[in-house]
Amino acid sequence: MPLNKERGFLIREEYSGIKEKMICDKHNLTQVGGTRTKVDGTDGVNNFSIKNASGISTQIHLTTQNHFIKGFDLDDKSTEFIKLFCGSKDIKNKNKDRFTIQEIDEEYVNSFRNFLEKNKEKIVDLIVRNGFGINIVVYNDIKNNVEYLITYDEILEKIKDCHWVFMKGGIHLKNSDGATYFHLQREGKRNPSNRYNVLWHVHKHLFTH
């Protein structure tokens, strides 16, 4: 069945409603949820972020280019990288509205790479917590009916030896074995109002490797 707007709404409702509530009930949590917080459930001490996924990764954080740029006070070269990588309606690059990493000036790429390396923990804090004090992240693999759980402190420990790998369409934070924990891409939806945003995914490898 094609994923039209109505079906997309029903899927989001199921994932953020029914399936999220099941996880909350399992861990004796009060369901919170909503678009204005990263807290999906809480026991009054621990705040849970619940990610329902049907594949190897799922969305964990979405923000506009401007918000991302201003939030980290990016320099001019890193800012240019984000603008070219995520694109805009004004870009005309061989019938594309963005540039791949290989097409972006090496000076801009290296600037953003340096930013990522120097701010690895701050970036992970943004995409996992964003000021909401998340203690625990749950990856609910709905396809295989398996639940994985990791604490925020464990995430910080696991990313210490990770490195950023720049690929054609995204930037991956990988461990020493090459398993991706998080990756950055542009949102890329058809609607121009949310096509050019900065989108982060979390991978199941974070919980299993």
Image (cartoon, rainbow, N blue to C red):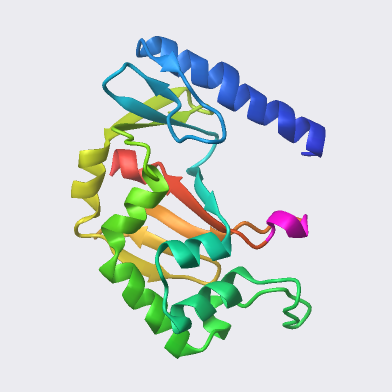
Residue 134 is left or right of residue 53, and the answer is left
Residue 193 lies in the magenta stretch: yes
Residue 126 lies in the magenta stretch: no
Residue located 33% across and 44% down the image: 206
Residue located 48% across and 49% down the image: 201
Viewer-side residue, 113 vs 37: 37
Residue 104 is left or right of residue 74, and the answer is right
- Residue 79 vs 86, above or below: the answer is below
The reply to whether residue 161 is in sight is: yes
The location of residue 123, given as percent across then percent down, is 35, 57
Q: Main secondary structure of the magenta part?
A: helix
Q: Quadrant of the N terminus?
A: top right
Residue 23 is left or right of residue 160, and the answer is right
Residue located 31% across and 17% down the image: 44
Q: Quadrant of the C terminus?
A: top left
The stretch of residues the image draws in magenta is: 191-195
The part of the image, by quadrant, that contains residue 87 is bottom right
The part of the image, by quadrant, that contains residue 153 is top left
The location of residue 158, given as percent across then percent down, is 22, 49
The location of residue 72, given as percent across then percent down, is 40, 65
The part of the image, by quadrant, that contains residue 188 is bottom right
The location of residue 159, given as percent across then percent down, is 25, 54
Residue 58 is left or right of residue 135, and the answer is right
- Residue 76 vs 144, above or below: the answer is below
The reply to whether residue 1 is in sight is: no
Residue located 81% across and 39% down the image: 4
